[in-house]
Image: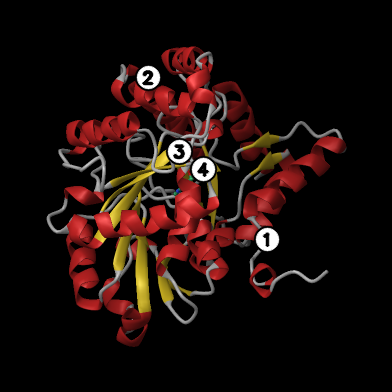
Amino acid sequence: MQDANRILKLPPYLFAQIDKKIAEKKAAGVDVISLGIGDPVEPTPKHIIDKLYEAAQNPVNHRYPSYYGMPEFRVAIADYYKKRFNVELNPDKEILPLVGSKEGLAHIYLALVDPGDYALVPDPGYPVYETGCILAGGTPFYMPLTKDNGFNPKFDEIPSEIAKKAKLMWLCYPNNPTAAIAKDGLYEEAIEFANKYDVAILSDNPYSELTYDGYVAPSFLETPGAKKVGIEFNSLSKTYNMTGWRIGYAVGNAKLIDALGRVKTNVDSGIFNAIQLAGIEALSGPQDCVGEMCQIYQRRRDMVMDALDSLGIAAAKPKGTIYVWVPVPDGFDSVTFANHILEKTGVVVPPGSAYGPSGEGYIRICLSVKDDRLKEALERLKNSL
Ligand SMILES: Cc1ncc(COP(=O)(O)O)c(C=O)c1O
Protein backbone atom coordinates (compact mmCIF):
# COMPACT_ATOMS: atom_id res chain seq x y z
CA MET A 1 0.00 0.00 0.00
CA GLN A 2 1.13 3.50 -0.84
CA ASP A 3 1.15 6.43 1.63
CA ALA A 4 -0.68 9.58 0.54
CA ASN A 5 1.56 12.28 -0.91
CA ARG A 6 0.72 14.61 1.94
CA ILE A 7 2.27 12.15 4.38
CA LEU A 8 5.38 11.82 2.26
CA LYS A 9 5.81 15.60 2.33
CA LEU A 10 5.90 15.71 6.15
CA PRO A 11 9.26 16.17 7.84
CA PRO A 12 9.85 13.56 10.57
CA TYR A 13 8.29 14.69 13.89
CA LEU A 14 11.12 16.13 15.97
CA PHE A 15 10.28 14.61 19.33
CA ALA A 16 9.65 11.16 17.89
CA GLN A 17 13.24 11.28 16.62
CA ILE A 18 14.52 12.49 19.96
CA ASP A 19 12.63 9.69 21.78
CA LYS A 20 14.35 7.19 19.51
CA LYS A 21 17.78 8.62 20.33
CA ILE A 22 17.00 8.50 24.05
CA ALA A 23 15.92 4.86 23.78
CA GLU A 24 19.14 3.94 21.94
CA LYS A 25 21.34 5.62 24.55
CA LYS A 26 19.43 4.07 27.44
CA ALA A 27 19.72 0.65 25.84
CA ALA A 28 23.49 1.25 25.70
CA GLY A 29 23.47 1.87 29.48
CA VAL A 30 23.85 5.67 29.36
CA ASP A 31 22.22 7.67 32.18
CA VAL A 32 20.31 9.97 29.83
CA ILE A 33 19.02 13.35 31.03
CA SER A 34 16.52 14.85 28.63
CA LEU A 35 16.31 18.62 28.37
CA GLY A 36 14.24 18.01 25.25
CA ILE A 37 10.48 18.07 25.29
CA GLY A 38 8.57 20.71 27.29
CA ASP A 39 6.65 18.33 29.51
CA PRO A 40 6.34 19.36 33.19
CA VAL A 41 7.73 16.80 35.66
CA GLU A 42 5.78 18.20 38.62
CA PRO A 43 2.35 16.61 39.17
CA THR A 44 -0.99 18.21 38.38
CA PRO A 45 -2.16 20.10 41.52
CA LYS A 46 -4.13 17.90 43.92
CA HIS A 47 -7.39 19.87 43.87
CA ILE A 48 -7.60 19.29 40.10
CA ILE A 49 -6.91 15.55 40.41
CA ASP A 50 -9.50 15.30 43.23
CA LYS A 51 -12.11 16.87 40.96
CA LEU A 52 -11.32 14.41 38.18
CA TYR A 53 -11.59 11.52 40.64
CA GLU A 54 -14.97 12.73 41.87
CA ALA A 55 -16.31 13.45 38.37
CA ALA A 56 -15.08 10.12 37.02
CA GLN A 57 -17.32 8.30 39.55
CA ASN A 58 -20.46 9.82 38.03
CA PRO A 59 -21.87 7.68 35.19
CA VAL A 60 -23.41 10.80 33.61
CA ASN A 61 -19.86 11.74 32.64
CA HIS A 62 -19.15 8.41 30.97
CA ARG A 63 -21.17 9.18 27.85
CA TYR A 64 -20.10 11.11 24.76
CA PRO A 65 -19.29 14.70 25.64
CA SER A 66 -20.81 17.60 23.70
CA TYR A 67 -18.91 18.40 20.50
CA TYR A 68 -18.64 22.03 21.55
CA GLY A 69 -17.55 21.33 25.13
CA MET A 70 -19.59 21.51 28.32
CA PRO A 71 -21.35 24.89 28.64
CA GLU A 72 -19.97 25.15 32.21
CA PHE A 73 -16.41 24.71 30.92
CA ARG A 74 -16.94 27.39 28.29
CA VAL A 75 -18.28 29.75 30.97
CA ALA A 76 -15.23 29.00 33.13
CA ILE A 77 -12.96 29.90 30.20
CA ALA A 78 -14.90 33.14 29.63
CA ASP A 79 -14.61 34.04 33.33
CA TYR A 80 -10.90 33.24 33.27
CA TYR A 81 -10.22 35.42 30.22
CA LYS A 82 -12.21 38.28 31.78
CA LYS A 83 -10.40 38.04 35.10
CA ARG A 84 -6.91 37.39 33.75
CA PHE A 85 -6.87 39.52 30.57
CA ASN A 86 -9.99 41.69 30.84
CA VAL A 87 -11.19 40.14 27.57
CA GLU A 88 -14.95 39.61 27.15
CA LEU A 89 -15.95 36.37 25.41
CA ASN A 90 -19.31 34.94 24.51
CA PRO A 91 -19.23 31.36 25.85
CA ASP A 92 -21.59 30.12 23.12
CA LYS A 93 -19.95 31.68 20.08
CA GLU A 94 -16.41 32.68 20.91
CA ILE A 95 -15.04 29.69 22.82
CA LEU A 96 -14.23 26.16 21.67
CA PRO A 97 -12.69 23.52 23.98
CA LEU A 98 -9.98 21.41 22.35
CA VAL A 99 -8.52 17.97 22.97
CA GLY A 100 -5.23 19.72 23.82
CA SER A 101 -4.41 22.85 21.86
CA LYS A 102 -2.20 20.92 19.39
CA GLU A 103 -5.33 19.33 17.99
CA GLY A 104 -6.83 22.76 17.24
CA LEU A 105 -3.56 24.06 15.81
CA ALA A 106 -3.63 21.27 13.24
CA HIS A 107 -7.38 21.29 12.55
CA ILE A 108 -7.67 25.04 11.98
CA TYR A 109 -5.86 24.42 8.69
CA LEU A 110 -8.69 22.19 7.46
CA ALA A 111 -11.07 25.05 8.23
CA LEU A 112 -9.09 27.82 6.53
CA VAL A 113 -6.55 26.56 4.02
CA ASP A 114 -7.08 25.09 0.55
CA PRO A 115 -4.35 23.83 -1.78
CA GLY A 116 -2.58 26.88 -3.21
CA ASP A 117 -3.09 28.97 -0.09
CA TYR A 118 -0.20 30.18 2.02
CA ALA A 119 0.21 30.21 5.79
CA LEU A 120 2.63 32.64 7.45
CA VAL A 121 4.65 30.57 9.87
CA PRO A 122 7.26 31.73 12.40
CA ASP A 123 10.72 30.30 11.74
CA PRO A 124 11.78 28.82 14.12
CA GLY A 125 8.39 27.70 15.40
CA TYR A 126 6.33 24.97 16.99
CA PRO A 127 6.45 22.25 14.28
CA VAL A 128 2.64 21.84 13.94
CA TYR A 129 2.32 25.31 12.34
CA GLU A 130 4.20 23.91 9.36
CA THR A 131 3.04 20.29 9.33
CA GLY A 132 -0.64 21.21 9.80
CA CYS A 133 -0.30 23.39 6.70
CA ILE A 134 1.31 20.61 4.66
CA LEU A 135 -1.44 18.14 5.70
CA ALA A 136 -4.06 20.58 4.43
CA GLY A 137 -2.25 20.96 1.10
CA GLY A 138 -1.21 24.55 1.83
CA THR A 139 2.22 26.13 1.52
CA PRO A 140 4.03 27.45 4.60
CA PHE A 141 5.87 30.74 4.17
CA TYR A 142 8.53 31.32 6.82
CA MET A 143 8.67 34.52 8.80
CA PRO A 144 12.24 34.49 10.17
CA LEU A 145 12.53 35.26 13.90
CA THR A 146 15.98 36.68 14.43
CA LYS A 147 17.87 38.14 17.34
CA ASP A 148 18.08 41.65 15.83
CA ASN A 149 14.28 41.98 16.07
CA GLY A 150 13.92 40.29 19.45
CA PHE A 151 12.72 37.11 17.69
CA ASN A 152 9.59 38.92 16.48
CA PRO A 153 8.52 38.73 12.80
CA LYS A 154 9.14 41.62 10.42
CA PHE A 155 5.85 42.08 8.61
CA ASP A 156 7.31 44.50 6.07
CA GLU A 157 9.57 41.71 4.78
CA ILE A 158 6.63 39.51 3.75
CA PRO A 159 6.26 39.95 -0.05
CA SER A 160 2.83 41.38 -0.89
CA GLU A 161 2.17 38.64 -3.49
CA ILE A 162 2.58 36.05 -0.68
CA ALA A 163 0.52 38.10 1.78
CA LYS A 164 -2.32 38.26 -0.76
CA LYS A 165 -2.36 34.45 -1.00
CA ALA A 166 -1.98 33.90 2.76
CA LYS A 167 -5.00 32.80 4.76
CA LEU A 168 -3.48 32.90 8.23
CA MET A 169 -0.52 33.96 10.32
CA TRP A 170 0.77 32.39 13.54
CA LEU A 171 2.13 34.37 16.46
CA CYS A 172 3.37 32.74 19.67
CA TYR A 173 4.49 34.88 22.61
CA PRO A 174 5.99 33.98 25.06
CA ASN A 175 7.63 32.06 22.25
CA ASN A 176 8.55 28.46 21.78
CA PRO A 177 11.39 27.82 20.98
CA THR A 178 13.16 31.20 21.34
CA ALA A 179 11.59 32.12 24.74
CA ALA A 180 11.18 35.70 23.44
CA ILE A 181 8.27 37.93 24.42
CA ALA A 182 6.11 40.04 22.13
CA LYS A 183 7.64 43.45 21.51
CA ASP A 184 5.54 46.56 22.07
CA GLY A 185 3.22 47.16 19.13
CA LEU A 186 3.54 43.65 17.66
CA TYR A 187 -0.14 42.85 17.95
CA GLU A 188 -1.23 46.26 16.63
CA GLU A 189 1.01 45.76 13.59
CA ALA A 190 -0.33 42.23 13.09
CA ILE A 191 -3.93 43.47 13.16
CA GLU A 192 -3.12 46.17 10.61
CA PHE A 193 -1.53 43.51 8.38
CA ALA A 194 -4.53 41.19 8.86
CA ASN A 195 -6.96 43.92 7.82
CA LYS A 196 -4.86 44.91 4.82
CA TYR A 197 -4.50 41.37 3.43
CA ASP A 198 -7.52 39.60 4.91
CA VAL A 199 -5.36 37.19 6.87
CA ALA A 200 -6.53 35.47 10.08
CA ILE A 201 -4.22 35.97 13.05
CA LEU A 202 -3.78 32.84 15.16
CA SER A 203 -2.16 33.58 18.49
CA ASP A 204 -0.79 30.47 20.19
CA ASN A 205 -0.42 31.36 23.86
CA PRO A 206 0.17 28.23 25.98
CA TYR A 207 2.97 29.89 28.00
CA SER A 208 0.98 33.00 28.96
CA GLU A 209 1.16 32.14 32.66
CA LEU A 210 4.75 30.94 32.89
CA THR A 211 6.59 34.23 33.16
CA TYR A 212 9.41 35.56 35.33
CA ASP A 213 10.93 38.64 36.96
CA GLY A 214 7.50 40.27 37.27
CA TYR A 215 6.70 40.11 33.53
CA VAL A 216 2.99 39.55 32.83
CA ALA A 217 2.24 38.26 29.33
CA PRO A 218 -0.74 39.74 27.49
CA SER A 219 -3.38 37.96 25.46
CA PHE A 220 -3.45 38.93 21.78
CA LEU A 221 -7.18 39.50 22.30
CA GLU A 222 -6.49 42.44 24.63
CA THR A 223 -5.43 44.53 21.61
CA PRO A 224 -8.25 46.62 20.11
CA GLY A 225 -9.50 45.04 16.87
CA ALA A 226 -7.98 41.62 17.65
CA LYS A 227 -11.26 39.76 17.85
CA LYS A 228 -12.25 41.05 14.42
CA VAL A 229 -9.31 39.28 12.81
CA GLY A 230 -8.22 36.39 14.97
CA ILE A 231 -8.38 33.80 17.66
CA GLU A 232 -6.12 32.68 20.46
CA PHE A 233 -5.24 29.13 21.41
CA ASN A 234 -4.51 28.43 25.04
CA SER A 235 -3.97 25.29 27.04
CA LEU A 236 -4.09 23.88 30.53
CA SER A 237 -1.07 21.71 29.70
CA LYS A 238 1.80 23.88 30.84
CA THR A 239 -0.03 26.20 33.24
CA TYR A 240 -1.32 23.39 35.46
CA ASN A 241 1.07 20.52 34.60
CA MET A 242 -1.68 18.80 32.63
CA THR A 243 0.03 17.80 29.39
CA GLY A 244 -1.25 14.23 29.59
CA TRP A 245 -4.87 15.24 30.17
CA ARG A 246 -5.31 16.76 26.70
CA ILE A 247 -7.32 19.88 27.39
CA GLY A 248 -7.04 23.28 25.77
CA TYR A 249 -9.24 25.76 23.96
CA ALA A 250 -9.55 28.37 21.21
CA VAL A 251 -11.16 31.76 21.87
CA GLY A 252 -11.97 34.86 19.87
CA ASN A 253 -13.50 35.58 16.47
CA ALA A 254 -16.87 33.81 16.26
CA LYS A 255 -16.58 33.01 12.55
CA LEU A 256 -13.19 31.34 12.97
CA ILE A 257 -14.38 29.47 16.09
CA ASP A 258 -17.41 28.25 14.14
CA ALA A 259 -15.24 27.08 11.22
CA LEU A 260 -12.90 25.17 13.55
CA GLY A 261 -15.92 23.67 15.34
CA ARG A 262 -17.34 22.42 12.05
CA VAL A 263 -14.11 20.54 11.32
CA LYS A 264 -13.98 19.10 14.83
CA THR A 265 -17.53 17.77 14.85
CA ASN A 266 -16.39 15.54 12.00
CA VAL A 267 -13.14 14.30 13.45
CA ASP A 268 -13.42 14.01 17.24
CA SER A 269 -16.07 13.78 19.91
CA GLY A 270 -14.78 16.21 22.47
CA ILE A 271 -13.03 15.95 25.83
CA PHE A 272 -14.04 13.46 28.55
CA ASN A 273 -16.54 15.37 30.71
CA ALA A 274 -14.69 14.50 33.93
CA ILE A 275 -11.59 16.17 32.50
CA GLN A 276 -13.61 19.26 31.55
CA LEU A 277 -14.95 19.42 35.12
CA ALA A 278 -11.39 19.18 36.40
CA GLY A 279 -10.51 21.89 33.87
CA ILE A 280 -13.13 24.16 35.45
CA GLU A 281 -11.49 23.50 38.82
CA ALA A 282 -8.09 24.40 37.33
CA LEU A 283 -9.27 27.69 35.80
CA SER A 284 -11.53 28.85 38.61
CA GLY A 285 -9.88 27.25 41.66
CA PRO A 286 -6.86 28.53 43.62
CA GLN A 287 -4.07 29.81 41.38
CA ASP A 288 -1.17 29.61 43.88
CA CYS A 289 0.00 26.47 42.08
CA VAL A 290 0.78 28.58 39.01
CA GLY A 291 2.91 31.04 40.97
CA GLU A 292 4.74 28.13 42.58
CA MET A 293 5.56 26.65 39.17
CA CYS A 294 6.83 30.04 37.98
CA GLN A 295 9.18 30.16 40.97
CA ILE A 296 10.46 26.67 40.21
CA TYR A 297 11.06 27.45 36.53
CA GLN A 298 12.66 30.81 37.36
CA ARG A 299 15.07 29.07 39.73
CA ARG A 300 15.97 26.53 37.03
CA ARG A 301 16.31 29.25 34.43
CA ASP A 302 18.81 30.98 36.72
CA MET A 303 20.75 27.72 37.17
CA VAL A 304 20.99 27.43 33.37
CA MET A 305 21.95 31.09 32.93
CA ASP A 306 24.74 30.74 35.55
CA ALA A 307 26.10 27.63 33.86
CA LEU A 308 26.03 29.27 30.42
CA ASP A 309 27.71 32.34 31.88
CA SER A 310 30.54 30.27 33.28
CA LEU A 311 30.96 28.69 29.84
CA GLY A 312 31.10 32.11 28.19
CA ILE A 313 27.89 31.44 26.25
CA ALA A 314 25.73 34.58 26.01
CA ALA A 315 22.06 33.51 25.92
CA ALA A 316 19.22 35.96 26.48
CA LYS A 317 17.60 35.56 29.90
CA PRO A 318 14.00 34.48 29.21
CA LYS A 319 11.09 36.36 30.76
CA GLY A 320 8.73 33.51 29.94
CA THR A 321 8.21 29.91 28.73
CA ILE A 322 10.08 26.89 30.05
CA TYR A 323 12.94 27.18 27.57
CA VAL A 324 16.30 28.84 27.14
CA TRP A 325 17.40 29.52 23.56
CA VAL A 326 21.14 29.01 23.54
CA PRO A 327 23.55 30.13 20.79
CA VAL A 328 25.99 27.35 19.90
CA PRO A 329 29.71 27.98 20.47
CA ASP A 330 32.11 28.62 17.58
CA GLY A 331 33.04 25.54 15.63
CA PHE A 332 29.61 23.92 15.92
CA ASP A 333 26.26 24.15 14.17
CA SER A 334 22.96 23.26 15.84
CA VAL A 335 23.06 19.57 15.01
CA THR A 336 26.76 19.01 15.66
CA PHE A 337 26.46 20.77 19.04
CA ALA A 338 23.36 18.80 20.07
CA ASN A 339 25.09 15.56 18.99
CA HIS A 340 28.30 16.55 20.79
CA ILE A 341 26.35 17.12 24.00
CA LEU A 342 24.51 13.82 23.69
CA GLU A 343 27.66 11.82 22.92
CA LYS A 344 29.86 13.44 25.57
CA THR A 345 27.32 13.87 28.37
CA GLY A 346 24.18 11.80 27.75
CA VAL A 347 22.17 15.04 27.86
CA VAL A 348 19.49 15.45 25.19
CA VAL A 349 18.80 18.89 23.72
CA PRO A 350 16.98 19.61 20.46
CA PRO A 351 18.95 21.43 17.76
CA GLY A 352 17.43 24.81 16.93
CA SER A 353 17.43 23.99 13.22
CA ALA A 354 14.76 21.33 13.88
CA TYR A 355 12.31 24.22 14.47
CA GLY A 356 13.06 25.85 11.12
CA PRO A 357 16.06 27.11 9.15
CA SER A 358 16.37 30.30 11.23
CA GLY A 359 16.85 28.13 14.31
CA GLU A 360 20.30 27.26 12.97
CA GLY A 361 23.01 28.35 15.39
CA TYR A 362 20.97 27.54 18.51
CA ILE A 363 19.92 24.69 20.75
CA ARG A 364 16.95 24.75 23.12
CA ILE A 365 17.26 23.85 26.79
CA CYS A 366 14.03 22.91 28.52
CA LEU A 367 13.47 23.57 32.23
CA SER A 368 10.99 20.76 32.84
CA VAL A 369 13.41 18.50 34.67
CA LYS A 370 13.94 18.15 38.42
CA ASP A 371 16.56 20.52 39.92
CA ASP A 372 19.02 17.76 40.86
CA ARG A 373 18.92 16.31 37.33
CA LEU A 374 19.27 19.77 35.80
CA LYS A 375 22.25 20.45 38.07
CA GLU A 376 23.81 17.15 37.02
CA ALA A 377 23.15 17.92 33.32
CA LEU A 378 24.74 21.36 33.64
CA GLU A 379 27.79 19.92 35.45
CA ARG A 380 28.25 17.38 32.66
CA LEU A 381 27.86 20.14 30.09
CA LYS A 382 30.52 22.27 31.78
CA ASN A 383 32.93 19.35 31.87
CA SER A 384 32.35 18.49 28.22
CA LEU A 385 33.27 21.88 26.83
C1 LIG B 1 3.91 26.70 21.24
C2 LIG B 1 3.10 25.51 21.57
N1 LIG B 1 1.83 25.44 21.15
C3 LIG B 1 1.05 24.40 21.43
C4 LIG B 1 1.52 23.33 22.17
C5 LIG B 1 0.60 22.16 22.41
O1 LIG B 1 0.13 22.09 23.70
P1 LIG B 1 -1.07 21.13 24.10
O2 LIG B 1 -1.51 20.38 22.89
O3 LIG B 1 -0.55 20.23 25.15
O4 LIG B 1 -2.17 22.04 24.59
C6 LIG B 1 2.84 23.35 22.64
C7 LIG B 1 3.37 22.21 23.37
O5 LIG B 1 4.55 22.09 23.63
C8 LIG B 1 3.64 24.47 22.33
O6 LIG B 1 4.91 24.56 22.74
Q: Amino acid at mark 4?
A: Ser
- Numbered badge on residue 36: none
Identified by mark 3, the residue type is Ile
Residue at which label 4 appears: 269
Please name the colour scheme applied to the rendered image: secondary structure
- Disc nearer the start of the sequence (3/1): 1
The CA distance from mark 3 to mark 2 is 16 Å
Q: CA distance from mark 3 to mark 1?
A: 24 Å
Residue at numbered disc 1:
12
Q: Tell whether label 4 touches label 2 (CB within 8 Å).
A: no
> Which marked residue is nearer to the observer: mark 3 or mark 1?
1
| Residue picked out by circle 2 | 289
Label 2 near label 3: C-beta < 8 Å?
Answer: no
Q: Earlier in the sequence, mark 2 or mark 4?
A: 4
Quarter of the picture containing the N terminus is: bottom right
What's the residue type where badge 1 is placed? Pro
